Amino acid sequence: MDGMTLVTARLPLLQVDWETLLSVNLPTLLFVIIGVPLVLVAYIVGFDVLVRRLPKRSQPSVRPWVWVAPAIAFVGLILVYPMIGTIVRSFFDRHGDTFVGLGNFVRLLTDHGILIVLRNNLLWLLLYPGLVILFGLLLAVLSDRVRYEKPVKSLIFMPMAISFVAMAIIWQFMYYYRPPDVPQTGTLNAILVNILHGQPQTWVQDTRFNNFALILIGIWGGTGFAMVILSAALKGIPGELLEAARVDGANEMTVFRRIILPLMMPTIVVVGTTMVIFALKAFDVVYVMTAGNYNTDILARRMYAELYNAGNYANASALAVILLLAVVPVLIFNLRQFRAVEARR
Amino acid sequence: MSVATAAPPAAPPIRPQAARTRWSQRLSGQISNAGLQVAVLALTLAWIVPTLGLLINSFRSGGAFNTSGWWTALAPPFNFTLESYRHVLGASDLAPSFFNSFMIAIPATIIPTTVAAFAAYAFSWMKFWGRDWIFLALVGLLAVPLQLTFIPLLTLAVHFGLTSGNTILGLNAGFLAVWIAHTGYGLPFAIYLLANFFRVLPQDLFESAEIDGAGPVTVFFRLVLPLSVPAIASLVIFQFLWVWNDLLVALIYVGGTPEVAPLTVTLTNLVGSLGQHIEYLTAAAFVSMIVPLIVFFALQRYFVRGILAGSVKG
């Protein structure tokens, strides 16, 4: 089966509505660029004038709220209120009027299909952070010792700048499959056939390794992020410390294991927690590459499907809550880490 | 360091051995150095091959593309062409989405940055009831999946007519929905990053300004903002790239409506609908990457600084 002949269609031709674009959208854009900061500055300055009229004693307790009010309003409206709404919603049926307790969760978790979704999420959760850190650490330590460190790091960091959609397209051409009797045009299959004399594989469809193929795309994209942070931590280790160990006869492996690794541990943990959150939120790669087919579905994409394709708000809410429950340990860890850092200030 | 540890002149009998050790050490050092170079270059090569393949394919004509791999184009005759790019841009399939991406990303960067700057100033230099708890809640929100907000927010957006089917003063209301959503989603990180930067500004600065009779507004605009240009720059880059590259939020709030759809959404639709015209996909993908890559390579310094400041450092 061919990788990309699912649908053969012409390029969808979008008509540019130049009139709307020039008469409405462009002016709006300029208005927003200049207008919104102006309005916000006017708000701060205006309210400060009002605050100054208050008795001197109460000014310090009123003023901060003027400054944080817009942010709290946005965060409350866009994050906190909907969060609570979704959690409440997950205990009601799909019409949102009958309380069903844990019914949605029980139905979802006993559904046969969900097991594969959870397994895939677990795969992402284990492989993605682990390998991103492994490659990131390897590249940080190795590139630290070559003269062309900067260009190397730029090139490896580059995927960070592009979208997961673009990454997925890039990798479609890595995984492209053609039958064994014609020349392979996908990079991986070409290596497999021409150099290793193997059979071409359908990397994206074959359920034996398609999840790994998708996770690899994420790893390719995320390693630069880990490398940059770990590299900064590495450069923060005092050179005298490493020099002293080397003078004492420690070889490079010992220096790495006994000095570099323990000193970098806090940073590795931080990168790891960020990657765990990324892994749980992974959506784009699966959505673009397989749309969740071939046993590659994950919670975030399944939630989108329940919301948009099935219109089942009960299931979608319950899936979102499951996602939240999965990040709770990371969230608590982050908070404790944050408070520990605050305490040291 | 090496000067300080240089060995004193050794006694003659030991010399040959010492020389041999040094020589073998140098050899093994050179071997491991060569191994190091090979490893770094191999990893780098492995990392750029996927992008390189797509780049080369985007400059090949369609026929060649379907029958042979991108690497065959590296041997003569070099048949490179701009056909795909001309098609993608000339037939203006992507042009509206390209504009839409700017239309979404620029306001969705400016609004949260401004709002966050004010809030971060209060969080780092003013005392108020519940300050630390609210900040802690923001740190907690950094980890919350956006999925948790979609259903109630969509309901609200529909209720207030902020959907891509409506227009407000001629402007597609879908834009407003995406701007507001991205502002809320971006704020916890934006406030966190800026507050971390603001509060390490020297205290004396604030004290002397206060003695001179400057109020908080003056201090903010005359001192804090000019001193924080690097932090604000990295936040702007971060948020801009995040919004530009976002697929999920755009899918949720504007769906596939062509008048509002950014590049990521249009590209995703191309992946689904392309079969014979796969070569245009390569050029389309690169068109979507041009802006982030320019931003990235021109302002990498700030971007890296933003990442470093944003990670909860241990």
Image (cartoon, coloured by chain):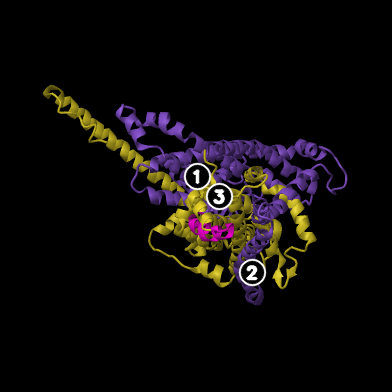
Mark 2 — on which chain does it sit? Answer: A
Q: Would you call the spot at circle 3 few (<14 residues within 10 Å), some (14-19), or many (20 or more)?
A: many
Q: Secondary structure at mark 2?
A: loop
Name the quadrant containing residue B249: bottom right
- Tell me: A265 left or right of A301: left
Q: Secondary structure at mark 3?
A: helix
Determine whether B117 is above or below B20 in the image. below
Q: Amino acid at mark 1?
A: Thr
- Tell me: A164 left or right of B146: left
Q: Position of residue B294 (x, y in %)?
A: 48, 61
Do discs 1 and 3 share a chain? no
Q: What colour has chain B?
A: yellow
Gap in Å between the C-alphas at discs 1 and 3? 22 Å
- Residue most extreme to the right: A98
Highlighted range, magenta: B213-233
Q: What colour has chain A?
A: purple
Using the image, tell me which numbered label, if any, was put on residue B193: 3
Q: Amino acid at mark 2?
A: Leu
Can residue A304 be seen in the rendering of this structure? no
Q: Which residue is mark 2?
A: A13
Q: Residue, x 51% and y 67% (percent of image)?
A: B85
